[in-house]
Amino acid sequence: HLNLQKNTMLQRRPMTSSLVLLLTTTVLTATNHVALVHAQQRQQQPLQPLGDVLHLILDTDKNSKVTMLEVNSQMTMLESLFQNNGGEGSEQADEYRRIVKGVRSWAPSIFALLDSNGDDGLTKRELQYATKFEKSLKKKKNEGGMRDFLGTVFDLLDENGDDSLSVTELLEGSANSDIIRKATVEFHKLFPLRNSPNELKDFVKGTIESIGGNTLDEESVAKGIAYLDDDGDGSISRKEVGKYYSVAGKKFIEVSTQIKQVGPMMAMFSGMDMGEREL
């Protein structure tokens, strides 16, 4: 389950947490641009799909493709914004800076994952997977969504079937090619980002390994699961994983809704900024 979520606190984070950070950062940018727009008016308008709005926001040169240069440009602008307007010692400003730092570190990996044809540019079609991801979080158990996928991964890693993942099980699971293969097949069913599951194997393997940060050993894994280990027994139970999955999923949906509300207006302001730079 939350092998993928717990890593929000580590140097390498799984897809779920990374996208939460990315979307949260986009919301912060959007809010800065649309302070004069009434929320009630936005809510009355039909919301566009998340992937379409992200493409609208990030494609600053309006050539129908989002590049890493454009993504990095957003990151640089945010870093400058928080440096100038968020005073040192401000809890909120410090949190924003941590978010931007996390997004910048994971953006290349998420970009590469979504760039299905490897042309270094994300089309609206490729960004539709952000919409699919959002929808998968809204699905309940046994409806084929992200919750079911994480449940399957948990079952694969839980070798002794005690509904709890130990440090040993996580270490052995991350090195077990059969477990990686089965998890990759399930991930591909949910998000067919490549022609075959095998092409996603490295990403899935890296996600499972990321519980240990940059060093996959007992000490690093123990430190990683401590974030989820509410009862302090040295392992993570299915209940603990479910709890933190629900928290992260709820946060993602809240942030994505905000993006869909303010994104189109933000894109309009971004276009105006582009025009001023050209002048």
Image (cartoon, rainbow, N blue to C red):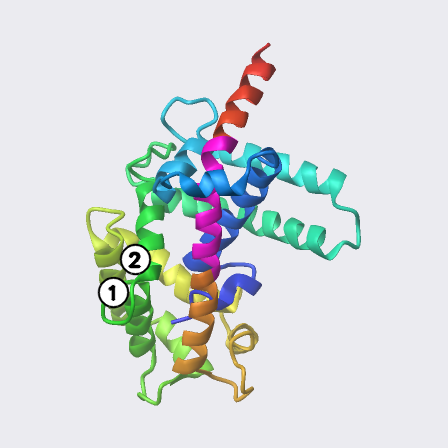
Task: Indicate the amino acid at tag 2.
Answer: Lys
Residue at (24, 56) in percent of width and height: 188
- Asked whether the residues under the numbered discs 1 and 2 touch, taking CB atoms below 8 Å apart as contact, a structural biologist would say yes
Relative to residue 131, is residue 66 drawn left or right?
Answer: right
Q: 50 or 174: which is nearer to us? A: 50
User: Is 147 drawn above or below residue 36 in the view shown?
Assistant: below
* Residue sitting at the far top: 279
Label annotation for residue 3? none
Mark 2 secondary-structure assignment:
helix
Please give the range of residues in magenta: 251-266
Look at mark 1 in the image and give the residue it sits on.
Answer: 181
Q: Label 1 vs label 2: CA separation?
A: 7 Å
Q: Main secondary structure of the magenta part?
A: helix
Look at mark 2 in the image and give the residue it sits on.
Answer: 201
User: Does the stretch in magenta take in 163?
Assistant: no
Give percent across and percent down for residue 235: 47, 84
Can see residue 241? yes
